[in-house]
Image (cartoon, rainbow, N blue to C red):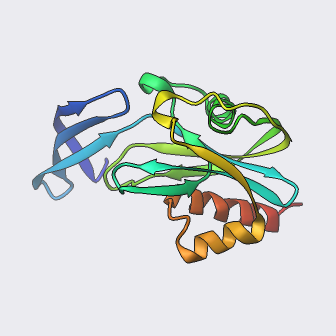
Amino acid sequence: MDPIQRVASREVYRNNWMTVREDAIRRSDGSAGIYGVIDKPSYALVIAQDGDRFRLVEQFRYPLGERRWEFPQGTAPDRADVPPAELAVRELREETGLRAGSMVPLGRLDVAAGMSSQRGWVFLATDITEGEPEREHEEQDMRSAWFARADVEKMILTGDITDAQSIAAWAQLMLAERHRP
């Protein structure tokens, strides 16, 4: 038996990117409560590596009111269910114009498990071919650039990269490199 059971649910808000719902719940001790949940589709995050350089994208993040550097990442339009590897290929091409000869899964990430159902998959893209980005309208302010490994690490340490998914993905990459057979 789950420690928390959903008794009822109501949709509070919906748009093309997410749904917000409020669930009436019952805890294992029998007490009642509510849980607010943000449902978003799965996303893919791609670490594109070419030798000792890595591709980042920068865009204005409206909720923060700031431009932020991060690894290319995103979901399928209209909350579509797309296989993670296919989504990774699409996001990399759309946001950076890059194509990868190799796309290796590094792991999964839960965005904010206390309030969101969204899960992500992290991929390492190598054997890179350059091309033109195919950005969505919402990404028109985006730019992308290559950064040396030392620069990515410095950007994380100095707070130029604060995106939690990008930092967690970097940790997955570091662990994968350390534990290669």
Image point (68%, 33%), residue name: 85
Image point (36%, 56%), residue name: 65
Q: Relative to the observer, which residue lies in front, 153 or 28?
A: 153
Image point (56%, 76%), residue name: 158
Residue 44: image quadrant is top right
* Residue 38, image x, y percentages: 30, 42
Residue 147: image quadrant is bottom right
Q: Relative to the observer, which residue lies in front, 112 or 132?
A: 132
* Residue 48, image x, y percentages: 74, 48
Residue reaching furthest left? 32
**How many discs mark residues in the rendered view?**
0
* Residue 63, image x, y percentages: 33, 51
Image point (25%, 38%), residue name: 20
* Residue 145, image x, y percentages: 70, 51
Q: Is residue 61 left or right of residue 72?
A: left
Q: Is residue 137 left or right of residue 34?
A: right
Q: Quadrant of the C terminus?
A: bottom right
| Above or below, 115 relative to 135 | below
Q: Relative to the observer, which residue lies in front, 2 or 108?
A: 108
